[in-house]
Image (cartoon, grey):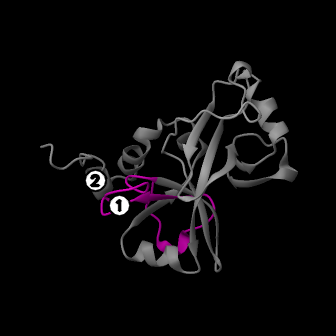
């Protein structure tokens, strides 16, 4: 994996928090950029699992047959809003393709059908999102808060969320691989 220059922040890019971000939701976070333009940026944190009980209208646990459904904290903005990140291309009119085999969107019918299908698509139910105003993300990148690399469906849906940050840094190689080994708590030495 090759580190990209900041001019390559675009839809389908991972933002990887640098060790300088040492607290809060963005600590060791990996964010999938879903939209990036001159007007601002929007993304979803994909490596912070949530343990929530959802109303039966959204997910009836008794009907859950799909083993590929996960719940994530998408970001600090509008945490009561749920967004679907998934691998299904059957509802293209309702979704935005983020990168190869990764789609954002869908309705409750799609969700209900997908969770009851044992061979259904991988789905991350993301609560909240991360957003930046015009030029804000570029400034944060230039200030050294983020590393970037291309996103993949494999990393989004198959890599364990708590291992994603270090896995991506290791794959980027060089100094990034070294950073992947920094312990979460530096006082434990």
The mark found on residue 179 in the picture is 2
Q: Position of residue 18 (x, y in %)?
A: 35, 60
| 8 relative position to 121: left or right | left
Determine contact: label 2, label 1, CB under 8 Å. Answer: yes
User: Is 4 colored magenta in this rendering?
Assistant: yes
Write down the quadrant of residue 101 in the picture. top right
Whether residue 100 is visible: no
Task: Identify the residue under disc 1.
Answer: 18
Decide which of 19, 151 is in the foreground and name it: 19
Q: State the SS at label 2.
A: helix
Q: Residue furthest right?
A: 93
Decide which of 49, 135 is in the foreground and name it: 49
**Sequence-wise first label, 2 or 1:** 1
Question: Alpha carbon of mark 2 to alpha carbon of mark 1: how far?
Answer: 9 Å
- Establish if 115 lies above or below 170: above
Q: State the SS at label 1.
A: loop
Q: Position of residue 171 (x, y in %)?
A: 40, 47
Closer mark to the observer between disc 2 and disc 1 = 1
| 60 relative position to 109: left or right | left
Write down the quadrant of residue 19 in the picture. bottom left
Q: Position of residue 37 (x, y in %)?
A: 65, 75
The residue sitting at 79% across, 43% down in the picture is 89
Which quarter of the rendering shows the C terminus?
top left
The residue sitting at 64% across, 42% down in the picture is 125
The residue sitting at 59% across, 80% down in the picture is 134
The mark found on residue 183 in the picture is none
Range of magenta residues: 1-29
């Amino acid at each position: 994996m090759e580190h990209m220059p900041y001019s390559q922040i675009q839809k389908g890019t991972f933002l990887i928090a640098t060790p300088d971000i040492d607290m809060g939701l963005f600590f060791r976070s990996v964010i999938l950029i879903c939209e990036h333009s001159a007007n601002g940026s929007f993304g979803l944190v994909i490596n912070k699992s949530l343990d929530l009980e959802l109303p039966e209208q959204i997910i009836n646990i008794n009907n859950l047959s799909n083993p590929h459904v996960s719940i994530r904290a998408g970001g600090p903005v509008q945490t009561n809003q749920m967004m679907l990140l998934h691998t299904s291309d059957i509802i293209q009119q309702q979704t935005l393709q983020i990168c190869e085999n990764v789609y954002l969107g869908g309705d409750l019918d799609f969700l209900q059908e997908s969770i009851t299908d044992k061979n259904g698509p991988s789905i991350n139910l993301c609560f909240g999102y991360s957003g930046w105003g015009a030029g804000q993300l570029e400034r944060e990148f230039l200030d050294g808060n983020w590393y970037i690399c291309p996103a993949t469906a494999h990393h989004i849906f198959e890599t364990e969320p708590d291992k994603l940050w270090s896995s991506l840094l290791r794959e980027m190689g060089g100094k990034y691989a070294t950073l992947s080994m920094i312990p979460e708590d530096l006082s434990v030495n």
